Image (cartoon, helix red, strand yellow):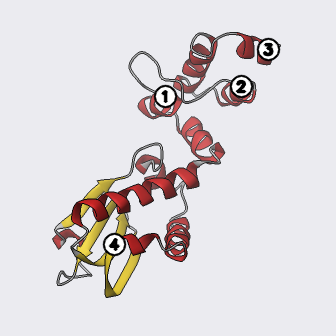
Amino acid sequence: MMQKIIQRTPNVIIGECLVNLASENEYLEPFSFILECGANPNTQDKEGYTALGRAKGNGCGQIIAYLTKSDKKLPSKLVKAIEEGIQKFSIEHGNKPVAVFAIEDGILSFGLEGEDPNNSSSWKYQGFYELPEEAFDLDVYEAGEINPDSFNQILDNLNQKDIFNKLNKTENFKYLFLRHIH
């Protein structure tokens, strides 16, 4: 019955109201049921918040974990966002010789030839590109709900796909994920 109501009623009316109520109040069981019935968790309210934004704003950790773990597109969104950051750098600074590419707290950084590869804070292009929240949720990562090792796998896969060839790489180019303890 609920599925029919959601399918026949514009999601903005029913879906937003139900998802909004459940995500703001940490009603995990009804929330997951509403999504299974077809409600869209990415529908924005009048302030522009999605279910994830509302859950974060209200400290609803179970809803945050559910949304980030249940989103099977999260890895592909993350990969796409990383590729976009690399592309942006190559377009804007394609002539710069890149020695190191790093992901650090959801930020893409580029260390140039001649810069200290072991000190990302000294790089000219440290903090060049921030990954969008829908691709990388820093709060969820800091809570330990995203496996840091998955970033190394993503970087290895990007390397196998020759994504880093868009950069003017140095002979000793390396890519890495910098893990911080918060």
On screen, residue 11 versus residue 81, left or right, reads: right
Label disc, if present, on residue 4 of the rendered structure: 3
* Residue that appears at 26% across and 81% down: 118
Which residue sits furthest bottom? 171
Amino acid identity at mark 1 = Thr
Question: The disc labelled 2 sits on which kind of residue?
Answer: Gly
Query: Between tags 4 and 2, which lies in front?
Result: 4
Mark 1 Cα within 10 Å, few/some/many (few <14, many 20+)?
many
From what the image shows, is residue 77 above or below residue 52? below
Q: Which residue is mark 2?
A: 38
Rendering coords of residue 90 (x, y %): 30, 65
Compared to residue 70, the image places residue 56 above or below, namely above
Look at 18% across and 80% down and name the residue there: 115
Callout 3 secondary element:
helix
Tag 4 near tag 2, CB within 8 Å: no
**Which amino acid, mark 3?**
Lys
Sequence order check, earlier mark of 4 and 2? 2
Q: Nearer the viewer, residue 58 or 51?
A: 51
The amino acid pointed to by label 4 is Leu
Left/right placement of residue 181 relative to residue 6 reads left
Query: Where 122 falls versus 30 (above or below)?
Result: below
